[in-house]
Structures are given as C-alpha cells and as structure tokens.
C-alpha cells in the first residue's frame, strides 16, 4: 500500500511520508465465529439505532482484513493499545496531514473521538 500511495501522489522523497505499522498488534487475537456474530449483531443494532453503545466507526486475506476489523471492534484492550501507539506516532512524527484508509480510519476515528470527549469533559469541569 505504501508504494501505491506514494506513486499515486507522485511522492519521491520517502522522508516526507511515514506509515504507522499496526498489524503486529493483532497477532494475539483470533476472531472466531462467535466474535463475527457479536460484531454483526452490534453493527446491525447500531444501524437501527437500537444499541446505545459507543460508535467508532504469508497470511491470507481473511486473516489480515476481516479478522482485524472484528477484533478491533470486539477487543477494548486492542483499541486501547492502538490508541496509545497512534498517539506515540503522532507525537514523534508531527504530521501535517493524516491519511487513513479502511482500518486506519477506524483507528483514527476512535482516537480523535475519544480525545474530543476528553476535551469536552475538561471544558465542563474548568
């Protein structure tokens, strides 16, 4: 993906683009059929507005992509670890632009949504 993104944007200097690697965070998780069922039920209830839960909206393709989304949505500790890593990455690289796609967009939404809520709480109590 990095090569394709750089080619698409005609980026020739690699030091201006940094990609956060997060695949390794998922190695300790293994989504099973029950996880998929819970994920689909929660997504369906959220879509209908019946579930008041928080919304965020080698290896083979199934293990890399659908499992990672299900695991991201089902595992609070994984989301916490990814938020910590994203924060560390943002502090280190100080990006001007954040381009997030697919699972990366879920991670960014989760991170920035929670940061906004913390800011709102701080404003109320100051």
Image (cartoon, rainbow, N blue to C red):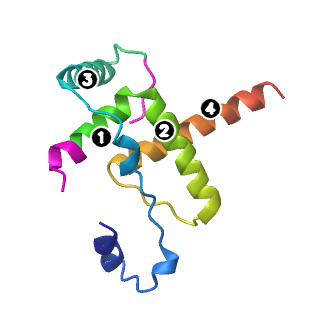
> From the viewer's perspective, is residue 8 above or below residue 103?
below
Location of residue 74 in the rendering, given as x and y in whole percent from the top left corner: 35, 26
Q: Which is nearer the eye, 108 or 36?
A: 36
Q: Mark 2 — residue?
A: 110
Q: Earlier in the sequence, mark 2 or mark 1?
A: 1
Q: Earlier in the sequence, mark 3 or mark 4?
A: 3
Q: Earlier in the sequence, mark 1 or mark 3?
A: 3
Relative placement, left or right, of 122 versus 75 is right
Q: Earlier in the sequence, mark 3 or mark 2?
A: 3
Distance from disc 2 to disc 1, alpha carbons, whole Å, reads 15 Å
Which class describes the residues within 10 Å of circle 3: few (<14), some (14-19), or many (20+)? some
Looking at the image, which residue is at 21% across and 19% down? Answer: 34
* Mark 1, secondary structure of its residue: helix
Q: Mark 3 — residue?
A: 35
Location of residue 29 in the rendering, given as x and y in whole percent from the top left corner: 33, 34
Place residue 41 in its image quadrant: top left
Q: Mark 1 — residue?
A: 68
Distance from disc 3 to disc 2, alpha carbons, whole Å, reads 20 Å
Distance from disc 4 to disc 2, alpha carbons, whole Å, reads 11 Å
Farthest right residue in view: 126
Determine if residue 15 is in view: yes
Looking at the image, which residue is at 31% across and 79% down? Answer: 7
Q: Mark 4 — residue?
A: 117
Magenta residue span: 53-64
Relative placement, left or right, of 76 versus 7 is right
Which class describes the residues within 10 Å of circle 4: few (<14), some (14-19), or many (20+)? few
Q: Nearer the viewer, mark 2 or mark 1?
A: 1
- Asked if marks 2 and 1 touch (Cβ < 8 Å), the reply is no
Q: Which is nearer the eye, 84 or 102?
A: 84
Place residue 101 in its image quadrant: bottom left
Which class describes the residues within 10 Å of circle 2: few (<14), some (14-19), or many (20+)? some
């Amino acid at each position: 993906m990095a090569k394709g993104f750089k080619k698409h944007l005609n980026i020739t200097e690699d030091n201006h683009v940094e990609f956060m690697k997060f695949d390794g965070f998922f190695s300790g998780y293994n989504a099973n059929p029950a996880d998929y069922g819970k994920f689909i039920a929660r997504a369906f209830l959220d879509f209908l507005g019946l579930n008041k839960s928080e919304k965020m909206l080698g290896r083979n393709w199934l293990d890399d992509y659908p499992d990672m989304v299900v695991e991201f949505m089902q595992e609070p500790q994984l989301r916490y670890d990814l938020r910590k890593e994203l924060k560390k990455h943002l502090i280190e690289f100080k990006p001007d632009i954040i381009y997030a796609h697919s699972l990366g967009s879920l991670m960014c939404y989760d991170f920035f949504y929670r940061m906004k809520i913390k800011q709102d709480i701080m404003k109320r109590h100051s």
